[in-house]
Amino acid sequence: MPTPNAKRELSLSINSGMLSFESEQSFQDALNLLDSVDWDTWETQNGFTSLRTSYLNTLTEDERLLMDELPIGGELMTLLNANSMIIITPWIIKLNNQTKKVWVMPVSEIQNIDDIVNENTANSNLRVFDYQDDVFEMLDNSAAKCNQSCTNGDRDKYKERHYCTSNNRDFKSKFKIKYVGFGIWHPISLMFSHRCMANCSSVVPGGGNLADFTNFSVAYTYTYTQKCQGTYNANVGHCYMNFQQTVLCNSGRDWNNNLYNGTRCLSSFDVSANVAWVNMCTTNVNFENEYLQINN
């Protein structure tokens, strides 16, 4: 069973335009690493163009600035190629985010790779799974099956707010918790974003994007049970970010933290979180607050 959230050296190569990992554990190691490095730099270092980069290149600059999350989690999108494909030995895997399906073919069939690209069901070596499936367990014929099941369906809650419009400005905050399955990745993520949408230059001395970096604090607690693997509890997690101390969290106008980052599904979870941020509409330091909770 792979180890979520551990940091290890990666073992990967590129085969037929796809990142190729020697095992599920190696793929898990890449997900863990991408939780804490710059994705663009990592791609350049590995000579690879990902689905994430290909997708962002189709957007205008304004569309990229307004987007607060990717259609598939950024870590996974950075490991998939432009055809949403990856090799995790002994499998070639393709995700179809429109149909929420995972297509799988043995690496030994790579000469027929067009069949998985085109989702050719006439090829008897192709298998198809749902995003909610625990795909790696279902592919592993050597593993003893347990009687627990994956939690049924995705969960997400968010609160979005626009404020300061009466002062001819527009600030937008969004706070979100979600658990979502992609078949080969089942993360729990916590996200906060804050944007100045209009008339930002009048907000701070010198103008520019400093208004996006409102001071904020996020506190959260969570527990989850990996299918047939026991329960993990985190009493308190905390992140604090301000204009001068962005190194303490992911820098930028969006903050995202994967509380669970695993390739295997969860059978239960419970997450609660509170965010407080400085209301940029006032000259006094006034905090806004939001609270969210999700569970199965």
Image (cartoon, rainbow, N blue to C red):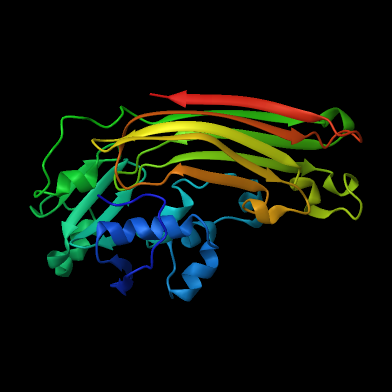
Q: Residue at x 26, y 47 (%)?
A: 102
**Residue 68 vertical placement versus 55 (above, below):** above
Answer left or right for 15 relative to 59.
Answer: left
Q: Toward the viewer: 278 or 60?
A: 278
Q: Position of residue 86 (x, y in %)?
A: 30, 61
Q: Pick the residue in front: 48 or 115.
A: 48
- Horizontal and vertical percent for residue 41? 54, 69
| Horizontal side of residue 199 vs 231, given as left or right | right
Foreground residue among 199 and 195 = 195
Residue for point 26% across, 63% down: 87
Q: Is residue 294 above or below residue 51?
A: above
Give the percent coordinates (x, y) of residue 46.
43, 74
Q: Residue at x 41, y 42 (%)?
A: 187
Q: Residue 167's quadrant in the figure? A: top right
Q: Quadrant of the C terminus?
A: top left
Q: Is residue 67 visible to the viewer in this orientation of the structure?
A: no
Residue depicted at 90% across the width and 33% down the height: 284
User: Is residue 61 left or right of 27 when viewed as pictured?
Assistant: right
Total labels drawn: 0
- Give the image location of residue 159, x and y in percent: 61, 27
Q: Along the line of sight, which residue is nearer the eye, 41 or 144?
A: 144
Residue 281 at least partly seen: yes
